[in-house]
Image (cartoon, helix red, strand yellow):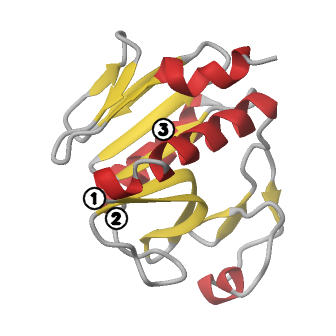
Amino acid sequence: MAMVGTLISVEEYLHTTYDPDCDYVDGEVLERNMGDQAHSTTQVEFAFYFRSRREDWNVFVFTEQRIRVTPSRYRIADLCVYAGQKPKEPVFQTPPFLCIEILSPDDRIERIQDRIDDYLKFGVPYVWVVNPRSRRGWIYTTDEILEAKDGVLRTENPAYAVPLAEIFAAFDRK
């Protein structure tokens, strides 16, 4: 993962199109690790899972959406979920209820932890980190980090439960 260019302003970042989109951290444009098929499949399955429950759970799910976590930091979540009301701004400035990060083969713990920290400091109550290769998931809150040892990622207030087996079932289809 390399940095793109030199320091730029927030305004320049917001008016530039990157393919794929990049994070913006304190004046630097940072490339995100490109996902592979496992990453893509996991992302689609999570999006479908939440989208198919939109009415029952009153949620809105977004993939690869820019989120302003501080005035000088913008993150692109693999998925973000809003409970209740759908955000109206083009670049989200209110914390999602949940951000989901799916690990790519080249992801490193320091960079993922920086993203998690940014989300939690911004006020995101839950961050899920999912490794599609090991089929494991972790739940991060400001108070704790839990591995979903029973294979179910959960939230409270509102209570959502997503069985990883249902997400990863797509991997076993021929």
Q: Which residue is mark 2?
A: 95
Q: Which residue is mark 1?
A: 123
Of 114 and 86, nearer the camera is 86
* Side of 124 where 45 appears, left or right: right
Q: Residue at x 37, y 21 (%)?
A: 152
Name the N-terminal-most of marks 2 and 1. 2
In the displayed structure, 142 sits above or below 7; it is above
The circle drawn on residue 81 is none
The residue furthest left is 157
State which mark lies toward you, 3 or 1.
Answer: 1
Where in the figure is residue 11, as x and y percent of width and height? 63, 89
Q: What separation in Å lies between label 3 and label 1 (alpha carbons)?
A: 15 Å
Position of the N terminus, as image quadrant, is top right
Crowd class of label 3 (few under 14; some 14 to 19; many from 20; radius 10 Å): few
Crowd class of label 2 (few under 14; some 14 to 19; many from 20; radius 10 Å): many
Name the N-terminal-most of marks 3 and 1. 3
In the displayed structure, 93 sits above or below 30; it is below
Q: Which quarter of the figure has residue 127?
A: top left
Q: Which quarter of the figure has residue 5?
A: bottom right
Answer yes or no: do the residues labelled 3 and 2 have beta carbons within 8 Å? no
Q: Residue at x 67, y 17 (%)?
A: 133
Where in the figure is residue 96, as x and y percent of width and height? 36, 60
Answer yes or no: do the residues labelled 2 and 1 have beta carbons within 8 Å? yes
Q: Is residue 153 visible?
A: yes
Q: Which residue is mark 3?
A: 113
Q: Amino acid at mark 1?
A: Gly
